[in-house]
Amino acid sequence: MSNLLSLTTFLPILGVLMLLFIPKDSKSVLRSVTFVVTVVTFIASLPVLIGFQNNADFQFVENVPWIAAGPFAMRYNIGIDGISLWLVILTTFIMPIAVLSTWTAVEEKVKEYMICLLLLETGMLGAFISLDLFLFYIFWEVMLIPMYFIIGIWGGKNKIYAAIKFFVYTMAGSVLMLVALIFLYFKGTAAGMTDFSLLHFYDLRLDPATQTWLFLAFAFSFAIKVPMFPLHTWLPDAHTEAPTAGSVILAAILLKMGTYGYVRFAMPLFPDAAHRFTPLIATLAVIGIIYAALVAMVQEDVKKLVAYSSVAHLGFVMLGLFAFNEQGITGGMLQMLNHGVSTGALFLIVGFIYERRHTRLITDFGGLSKQMPIFATIFMIVTLSSIGLPGTNGFVGEFMVLLGAFESEIRWYTVIATSGVILSAVYMLWMFQRVMFGELDNPKNQKLLDLNAREIGIMLPLIALIFIMGVYPNPFIEKMQPAINKLIAQTKTSSVTAQLPVDQVLPAGHPVVAPAPEQNPAAEQQNVPAEEATPAVINPHDAK
Amino acid sequence: MENLNSYLTVSAILFSIGTIGVLTRKNAIVIFMCIELMLNAVNLTFIALSRYLGNLDGQVFVFFVMTVAAAEAAVGLALMIAFYNNKESIDVEDVNMLKW
Amino acid sequence: MDMITIPAVNMTPIMPEIFLSVLAMALLLINVFVPSGQKSYIGYISFIGVIAAAVLVGTGWGMHVESFNGAVVQDNFASFFKMIFLLAAGLAILISDQYMVREECNHGELYPLILFTVVGMMLMAAGTDLMTIFLGLEVMSVSLYVLAGFNRENRKSNEAGLKYFLLGAFSTGFLLYGMALTYGATGSTRIADIATFAAQQSLPSSNVMLLAGMLLMITGFAFKVAAAPFHMWTPDVYEGAPTPMTAFMSAGPKAAGFAAALRILLVSFSTMQADWSQLFWVLAVLTMTVGNITALRQDNIKRMLAYSSIAHAGYCLVGFTAGNPTGTAGIMFYMLSYTFMNIGAFAIIVLVGKKGEPNGNVMDFAGFGFKHPALAVAMSIFLFSLAGMPPTAGFIGKFYLFSGAIQKGYIWLAVIGVLNSAASVYYYLRVMVYMYMKEPTEEFDWLQVSAPIALSLLISVTGTLVLGVVPSIVLQYAQEAIKLI
Amino acid sequence: MFDNVWLIPLFPLLGFLINGLLGKKIKNETVIGGIGAFAVLCSFAVSCMTILKLLSLPGEERLANVKVFTWMTCGNFNADIAFLIDPLSCVMIMIVTGVGFLIHIYSIGYMHGEEGFYRFFAYLNLFMFSMLLLVLGNNLLLMFVGWEGVGLCSYLLIGYYFHKKSAGDAGKKAFVMNRVGDFGFLLGAFTLYWFMGHNFNVWTIQFTELGKNAHLLPTGGVVTVITLCFFLGATGKSAQIPLYTWLPDAMEGPTPVSALIHAATMVTAGVYMIGRMNFLFIRSPETLMVIAVIGACTALFAATIGTAQNDIKRVLAYSTVSQLGYMFLAMGSGAFAAGIFHLMTHAFFKACLFLGSGAVIHSMHHALHHVHSHDDAQDMRNMGGLKSKMPLTFLTFLLATIAIAGIPGFSGFFSKDEILWQAFANPHHGQLNYLLWGMGAVAAGLTAFYMFRLVFMTFFGECRITPKAKDHLHESPMVIVIPLIVLAGLSVVGGYIGIPKLLGDLFGGIPNYFEHYLEPVFRLSEEYMAEHAAHGVAHHSVALEWGLMGTSVVIALIGIGIAFALYVVNTSIPAKFTATFPALHRAVYNKWYIDELYDYVFVNPCKALGRFLWKGFDVVVVDGVVNGVAKVVMSFGGIIRYMQSGFVYDYSWSMAFGVVVILGYYLFK
């Protein structure tokens, strides 16, 4: 089937339409239908995985005209390569789990909740498969809406603050990306491009100054989503307030949008700038790793602790990506998947005990191991995966990241980042100890029930993945390898150019991309007041 | 025609007087009168220019302005009456239910 | 003495105007004989009239006919805007009935007045002579003064009408003075002639009279589109006017203001673009910022949308500043989108309000989302569109507006614009917060959806979404339309 | 040849899976214990076959890499699941599976009736699996898997009694301390991989490949950094200064765990790792010196603490730390074979000691439990006179104690003496050698002292247990005693495979079999050392060697004599001593306050910093900025809002103002 990707992406929308016709009081029907829809989506995505050829090309491509007006031509251009393949699979894989996870936790407004989940799935899948920058931006923004409602409606005490913070924070970043996107497009048209197709932009050689500005805009937007220190403060709030499924999806997939954005857009589109800002990004990543670990250590709320651990983990991802070598980027990609699985699982676990006790304060627990042995075992495995114990998935990713980063120019950052492995053990195990070990002295905890079949069923696939990816990661690596090699080539060729003196690269007086006469913005600007002129972006020579 | 400048100056002064009136007076009717003054200043400009340029466009324009001003006056006074009916005042100091 | 020969006048360009005027006058007459409980029929007839006018406008698409010695023209630009006006009027008529009945001021004159307003706006869009434009503007304004104060028994409505009238007339003074000076500088009121004159000047901006004339006219239009610092009337008038009229005013007249300003500035003063785009740059930033920032602190939802409407004018001014096909087509597209989404939002406000609208605050929407899910979803769509979230019309509109600016090199303007747009999200979200995330304080049991409003909502939602997903269907027309001027 | 070597770790893994997943359902202790022990027995059998096969080969062919599958490949990085068979790994698997099997047997008896019996055996098997991976892994990464795996099992088993807070704390401490070491290990591995690859285009992490290419490496410099990093890893795992504090706390775990993990096997992983990468360590004299000094210091320092502890297991724990110090001293002196030899003998006698102490505790516990006394079953002050109650335990314990004390003829003597001699005679550290030897000798004396103190306090003298409980003390069941006997036997005879050359010559040229056996592993290094010896190969007279040997024996005997004097003859002296030097005793008793120091220097600042970053930076600064921007914007909204006064004239002023400004700007600009 040639339109397999579209099918996968829009199946959830079909599900939404079905849900609309189900009365809102038949909750179990609503849940079942949603679950079935997500499972079907997952099944629909499997042929993509199986049919995926191990090469660097985009596959399952669909490319039809969509909007064409004025200077713009947007296309419905989708496809996947080794980088997005796993993220798509991760998304379809996590969704049924997310739906199951709030089977009993969400009792009110079930219909709306399920609709939000399905819309969210479409948004996320769409963002991963878009090969048209404009289309990507649309999905990127669309994702916010259902997530906003999920946090805001079904969230905890402080849900409104968290939801608005989440939305406005992200929005503030992405609007700047929009400006950069448009600017990039006009750069492209000046070089003879006719649409927003990402593949064309890969070939566009921008001058370093332009790259710098564009990269900053993209990077800022993605950094908020990742989130990178110091733009991370929306995350603990959003996670803490969101219902379990929301947290799971947020951690497992939504945060990946940021890192994916770097891999897919910021790095290959602006390789010179990416290299130039590597020290900055690496610094922030390392600070994020250490900082988040330290802060996580002293958290009183389990969920917040896990949220901060996310920041640390994604710091590793960023570090790996900006190593610009195979191990680093592969490690980063693996770590993205790992984080999806293990942090998703952690949030599920937090959800389980929250559902039972309606508290997440560490001090309210203690000694649960005795009462809930199965839970304890699962929790332990996931914890270990999160701290990157060998044999679990977390290790493979973390190791590759550190190895790759160590081989690259950011060696010294890596040394500091490596100490993160100590801290992660500290905060995770300390939390685990306080929750699970010790005397079972709180009478409320003495009546807790162990996990039921549904909950075990949710966790089993995740646990299985934790081990599979830890013991035999090669299938995952093999599929993404060609795409990553291509990415490295894309970032490298340009950096070679960048090493030449700028004057050599640029014929005197002309930007690399020679603008058509009527579109030379510098010429049109002569009468514009100084404060609105933006020569630094427009003309590299002014920037110097 | 050196006189044109005099006409234009006069009308500019009239226009300014009208403007200042609008800015400073508190009675809605007086304000409206000041606006009428502004419009008539413009009319004067039109006429002078029309004469100076030797085409009739300006004069035709003035007719329209006068008509419109009349229509505006009708509507405006009606609105003031409606307001007066409810508030028993047409002082603009009292027209401040809607604010902030 | 020669016989006065009446020159053969081609009436086709103003057929819709004539049709609507005649219809409006006829309805005024008929109104006298319609018993007070039956005034809705006048509304229905008006609505049909609006559709008929739309058909008339539509059949003229693609033609270019000048008439009245170059005072009026029928071109795609005018037709596009006329469609927006008719849409605004149609939607406003649909939502008026239920509101006016509820507020007990369902006077028959309402609908003819709306039609007259449309006629005025159409003349503004079609006028190629300052005189025609002035006349259209005044026809529109005078009718609007009445519409704003239409609820005679309501003090807020009175006040709105009075304020609008006083300030509107005041601004007319400036506009008119500008026209006079322009006339003086160029010797003509024809737009084409002014353009010819300005083109002949080596440095047109050194002609003080011409420059002053242009600037004064800009201030006049700035008032109409509610650009800061000429925006002060907007919140008060929007808050006080009957809600359907607020909806109408926020969409139609603003579009008309842009139509006239676009034609004058792009045609007559195209050689002075460097001057006026500089001014518009400042106006755009001021307008966006003032509108958004003030809207953040509003509790009254109508007033909030009034400030938001100021902000939206600011976004359009960004496209205006660019003054290139992308930006100006963006304005046209945006005004159309805005008509859908804003009137849609006001329709919901009409529905939620009780008599006299004592519950016009954002807080009064608490829990609305789950009491009336369909309406709330519609409201959310409108709000997201206003906030510029894809996949709605509002996003595409903003995209084109800002693209125009970026294409022209006004990067920082675009940046300020998008940041404003991000800030605006907050107050739109706030409504949704109350709708979905707060416990209901009311049962909303008084709420009834009449067929006309349902229709208007259907049109608005469809328009907002369709324009968001497949904007090409309209954008290509806007592109064609902008080519002509 | 060695195709079935993967079975060795597989059996315990299967045992772990069966017990871990089904143990709760099985319930029957015999079956669970049987599965656990049998799995290890199978491994032991395969290990025996492996070593026999290995021995059948000529010396230079005793090396095999057995690949199971490719684990991960990425660019020039490749890691296999593959095993390395050579004399070193074979001796390790023999120790691990052999001692491990005995301890499994022992545990069946010891853990009888515990709530999480299946859990215990599952963990033990998992530990065996990890430990075997560690010693068999043919590359750095697989070794690291085992390295972390044993750390995890250690954590799980220390925290076995998880309802006790102290147990949980101890487990966490062990894991975190180990992680500090792992940090070093990782960095070392990264640097080594990058350095070799970047400079010599040898992109590998496989030990044999690295060894083959080690000649490319310079001496010192980067290699020092690499080896110091690895050594940091070793200090964590093997409880050396500065990361030793977790090991005494680790005694919170059940006693078999202490015997297996915290005495015989896991804690020696650091020594093994240095042995495995000897080709690297010899290329950095600086690191060797650091290792030797740290080893000697740890040996002495831990021994001092051991003299003042009253908890029977803690004494043994400090003893372990101290003995590990000896091993590192050997490694640091370049005497790799001696270090590994001591590793082996230590495994025998220390396992025996721990298991013996376990038997005592077990018995004490039952007795105290019987009379509902809450006295501490591990406190030696509650013991005494157990000799008659538990004769077999006493006997085995005594033999092991003699072995550790270094009395000639017992295994500990041979290995320890070899280390002390090498510390004295090695060509690396020049004058420092005398100091190293001196510290080692003093530590040997202290060892003899505290070990016999332990024996005397526990088995001799008055029985100090609550009189009522006395009658309930009795010898342990056979399942516990048999492993003790086997281990005691090994403690006695285990040393004879590595008789020092001096003694061997005396008895008619008996060769040092052990050293000879390990020669293929260390030959290259020894040749290298001979060439590069920093201070030249000193030639010491045979008389000197005899003299030193005699001295250390005398020191040990003095230690025993003092212990006898203080704890058998005149038991009031220790109390007097304590009274005379209260500060000293307190310091020693409180382990020189090292834990407190670490809390003060690392733990508390970290927590404080975390708290500050959270409440101070995250909430105040970052969110402060974010919310501050929002607030500023909002308050602007408030201000602008009030400009909207509602008065028409204000509005017209605004308009007029606009007009004037616009006109003014353009007309007068």
Image: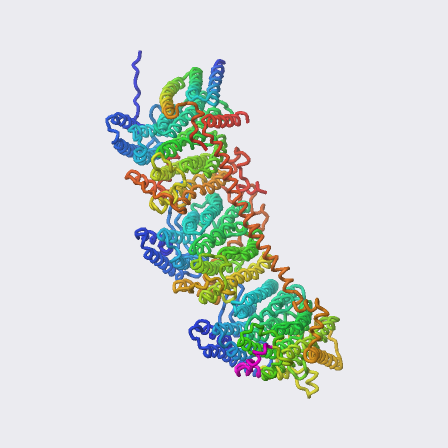
Residue D428 sits in quarter: bottom right
Horizontal arrangement in the rendering, residue C441 relative to residue D261 (left or right): left
In the image as oriented, which residue stretches furthest toward the bottom? Answer: D508
Horizontal arrangement in the rendering, residue A135 relative to residue D61 (left or right): left
Q: Which residues are magenta?
A: D465-486
Horizontal arrangement in the rendering, residue A365 relative to residue C100 (left or right): right
Asked if residue D480 lies in the magenta stretch, the reply is: yes
**Residue D419 against residue A16 in the figure, above or below:** below
Q: Nearer the viewer, residue D472 or C46?
A: D472
Quadrant where the N terminus of chain A is found in the figure: bottom left
Colour scheme shown: rainbow
Q: Position of residue D665 (x, y in %)?
A: 53, 27
Q: Residue visible at 55% across and 58% down?
A: A297
Q: Position of residue D179 (x, y in %)?
A: 57, 64
Asked if residue B97 lies in the magenta stretch, the reply is: no
Quadrant where the C terminus of chain A is found in the figure: top right
Q: Position of residue A414 (x, y in %)?
A: 58, 58
**Residue A106 against residue C125 in the figure, above or below:** below
Q: Nearer the viewer, residue C88 or B98?
A: B98
> How many numbered circles are shown?
0
Residue D378 seen in render: yes
In the image as oriented, which residue stretches furthest toward the front? Answer: D468
**Residue C394 against residue D434 in the figure, above or below:** above
Q: Nearer the viewer, residue C174 or D259?
A: D259
Q: Position of residue A430 (x, y in %)?
A: 54, 62
Residue C60 seen in render: no
